[in-house]
Amino acid sequence: MYPTSDVVVIGGGIIGSAAAFFIANDPDFDGKVTVIEKDNSYQSSSTTLSAASIRQQFSTPENIKISQYGIEFLRNLRENLALSDGSQSDVDLDIGLQEKGYLLLASTAGEGILRNNNKVQKELGAEISLLSPTQLGDRFPWMNCDDLSLGSLENKGEGWFDAYNLIR
């Protein structure tokens, strides 16, 4: 007899692992979840090899809200990944989360897009500042701002982390 499962997730990278985690932890789900990943070590998976990061500077409310949920999940990782009895695992949960922000830059052609995106982001509570070329030059003196029209910088909630440690 072949093994069976109620849900099979193909690909155990960050998205596949997250999907399996949330399905398995849904109180209304009473089945078995199986993750199929060709690299069981995850050392050469696309997640591990990527520049693991999180940002809120998107143009659609859905993506912004997903990232806002994601940053809170990462900030509270120890609680979110507690064992079912509420105890903590002995797994190292330090993913080295660095909330240093993302800087997006625009020329005159892209300034309107950056401003429109910023409006949507702020409506959803993202703390993103728009910076003039002068402000950009003051903050980043090494940057040539001659051909820039605007910059967009998140004040918190964006950054990078150790994806390999998270996926483990």
Image (cartoon, helix red, strand yellow):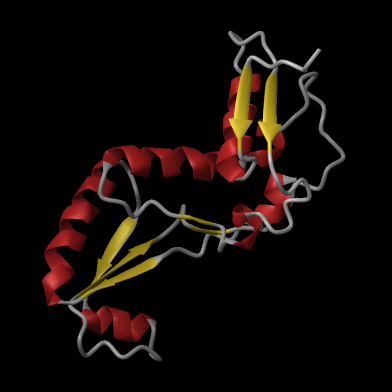
Q: How many marks?
A: 0
Q: Position of residue 96 (x, y in %)?
A: 67, 58
Residue at point 37%, 38% (across, down): 65
Give coordinates of residue 34: x percent, y percent: 69, 26
Indicate the position of residue 59 as horizontal and vertical percent values.
25, 50
In the depicted structure, whether residue 8 falls above or below residue 11? above
Say left or right for 149 vs 74: left
Name the one closer to the observer, 141 or 164.
164
Instruction: Please tell me which residue lies in front, 24 or 143.
Output: 24
- Can you say which quadrant of the picture contains the N terminus? top right
Whether residue 72 sits left or right of residue 151 in the image: it is right
Q: Looking at the image, which residue sits at the far right?
A: 90
Q: Toward which corner of the image does residue 37 lie, by quadrant? A: top right
Residue drawn where x is 37% and y is 69% of the image:
103
Foreground: 50 or 8? 8
| Residue 29 seen in this snapshot | yes
Q: Residue at x 83, y 35 (%)?
A: 89
